[in-house]
Amino acid sequence: MKYWRKPLDIEHIKIPRGRIHILRERCKSCGFCVEYCPRNVLETSEEFNSKGYHPPRVKDENACANCGLCEMLCPEFAIYLDGGEAVPVP
Amino acid sequence: MSGDGVLTGEFFMMGDVACAEGAISAGCRFFAGYPITPATEIAERMAERMPRVGGTYIQMEDELASMIAVLGASWGGVRAMTATSGPGFSLMMENLGLGIMTETPCVLVNVQRGGPSTGLPTLVGQGDMMQARWGSHGPYEIIALAPSSPQELFDLTIRAFNLSEKYRTPVLVMTDAEVGHMTEKVVIPPPEELETCPRRKPTVPPHEYLPYKADDDLVPPMANAGEGYRFHVTGLTHDERGYPVTDAETQDKLITRLIEKIKKNKDDIIQLEGNGLEDAEVVVCSYGISARTALWPVELARREGIKVGTLRLITVWPFPEERIRELSREVKAFVVPEINFGQIALEVERCAAGQAEVILVPHAGGDVHDPKKVLEAIRRAAR
Amino acid sequence: MSGEQVAASSKQALINEVSADSHPMDYLLREDRLPHIWCPGCGIGVALTCFIKALQKSGLDLDKVSVVSGIGCTGRVAGYVKLDSFHTTHGRAIPFATGLKLANPELKVVVFSGDGDLIAIGGNHLIHAARRNVDMTVICVNNFNYGMTGGQVGPTTPVEAVTSTSPYGCFEHPFNLPYLATASGAVYVARWTALHVRRLEKSILEALQKRGFSFVEIISPCPTLYGRWNKQRTGLDQMHYYHDSGVIRHGIDPREADIELGGKIIEGVFVDIEKPTFLDFCREALANQGIRDQGIRE
């Protein structure tokens, strides 16, 4: 990342990362998580769960910033995050 | 006249007021109601007395809200009651059904008046007796008590609370405008002398508790909201966990238990007052105010030499089928005076099964029976 | 390890997704009943998620939280929360909650029900409980129709919307719920859509912490019925609509928050005032007349 001037606290700031947990059997493919993830982490997978729905899968795991929006938007209690290892600002 | 705390002593009291005091003596601390003649006095008395005994009075926006607020209060752990008359009784039916289905202890007093519809607001009727039994939709059993005097209205209100807690069901007190508005001596015993039935609480920890798993007498222990049991209660057909399971098998299990819960315990619930039945040829079977007004014609008939006995139904539902069957084998006929066109008379006829004649003395409502008419019916029965 | 295995295992390591069997909110849900009955794309699950998140943040004693619902799709919420919950008769959740609260004022009573249940058959109870300022939180999920019974017209259905009992379009002007609640005397009135989850959660938290009658309306997708007949066939379509037409206006006069078919949805917190509750008033009035509170449970 290019800086005009390096922020004084750049050593301390870490970008949060999230680990995504998907309860595939609960998913009903509403698409909310895929659509509204601000970092485009998820996409609808080709696999089926036992009810015939396509659960989401992680497309780009490095992009997840642990914002929790997918967890809140999911109507099915089928996805949640926990904090991964925060990484330094590149 | 009202002071703080539960009353004790001898009073000259209106039936409605005695009903309110009976509830207070029984531990009722929540009343949700709506004004309706002739039950308004119960609400008024409760409005005055509830704060003085540490309870709550709320006048709800209609009778539907009153009935279900009473259910809510019961689940909050407080003994609760409402009072109404015919038109309000009709409105309360759906939520009465909810009370029966969810097995919520509570008391509903119906001070009957002339009907149908708006009818005779200030005058007596007894036309809601079948509605008491079948007014809500679906198959169920109900307990209904019929007092004949202000003292009995006091006593039976207490009994209603006890039965409701014992059997986890709403209990109806089917009184009428005459008894409700009659003023007589009422003796209120001190609290220590009153029989109370406490709510049966769960004996297992929350994670093992099944809200609708019944004990041997078919009554499940009841946890209140806020005690940490985290139960679910629904009006849908449910299993022992309280979760809705809407299939025929669960329906059969649940409804059979709800019905057997009352039927199996009939002997404990039913109360009758018989007089002169040992050698009777005619039995005057009645309840409420009609039982009182039948006393004079019965006396006159006895003076004429007719062997007539009386059977007063203190408990109208569950109906005392066995007693009527028994009597029908021994007597010629039943005379049933009631202020309607035949409701309990139909039950008597059903149970008599042709073994004895059943003569109804109907009355459209608005007044008590003319003693001459009842006497004529007794004479006809004796022939 | 072979080359393929290395590739596979590193691919696995790269995908930061873990397959799970349970969700952190399961302890507040009757997980033996999940997945729930609501349709794919239905917003009730979102409303429930926000509610649970708000409950977790509220610090309330969960043993004392009671959820009361009526009949309908939203009414099923009571059956899924692992709290003392009551699934009562149609329209009568609010008076039941009133009785429950007055019998045990320690309880935190939440009414969680739908637009048809709370506003049509339950309308009278809503306005009276708001008038009395009974201390409870009412969460009204508004999907503009009666979902459970097949998508009939309701008191919040916008003019010209098609439903199963308004096949030629709705001829009636709908209620403006924030206006209704405000006029009736609610102390906290807010409206959010199922899309604006963070603000919704915060609003529910505020409503839970508010003393008095608080009302939160949640505009929610109903893809199977209302949405399908009104050109918004999927939950996503309706979420897009909320995204495009949702406008946040805190403190605006609720009179102006009408919703027209396909029109703007004004969201925000409309009312946030202080007023004594029913019990406050009751106790004060009795105390002024020398009637000691002899033991209404604190």
Image (cartoon, coloured by chain):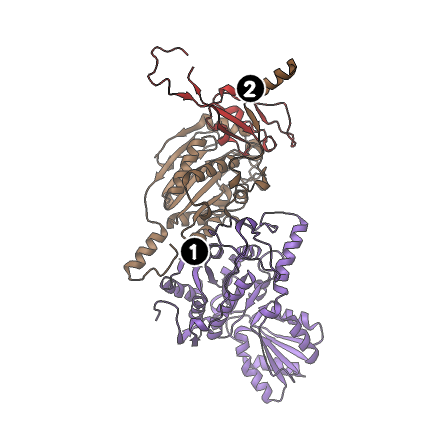
Note whether C259 is above or below C180 in the view shown: above
Q: Which residue is mark 2?
A: C14
Note whether B125 is above or below C7 in the view shown: below
* Residue positioned 55% across, 44% down in the render: C79
How would you rate the neighbour count of disc 2 (Cα within 10 Å): few for under 14, some for 14-19, many for 20 or more? few
- Chain of the residue where label 1 is placed in the rendered structure: C
* Residue positioned 47% across, 61% down in the render: B81
Residue C178: % across, % down: 40, 39
* Residue positioned 71% across, 73% down in the render: B354
Residue B325: % across, % down: 68, 74
Q: In front: B259, or B377?
A: B259
Residue C172: % across, % down: 48, 39
Q: Is residue A18 visible?
A: yes
How would you rate the neighbour count of disc 1 (Cα within 10 Å): few for under 14, some for 14-19, many for 20 or more? many
Q: Colour of chain A?
A: red
Q: Name the residue type under label 2.
A: Leu
At mark 2, the secondary structure is helix
Asked if the residue under mark 2 is in contact with the one under mark 1, i.e. CB atoms within 8 Å, the reply is no
Which of the image's four quarters has the N terminus of chain B? bottom left
Quick one: which chain is brown? C
Q: Colour of chain B?
A: purple
Q: In front: B218, or B350?
A: B218
Q: Which residue is mark 1?
A: C103
Name which of mark 1 and mark 2 comes first in the sequence.
Answer: 2
Q: CA distance from mark 1 to mark 2?
A: 56 Å
Q: Is residue C88 visible?
A: no
Residue B4 image-quadrant placement: bottom left
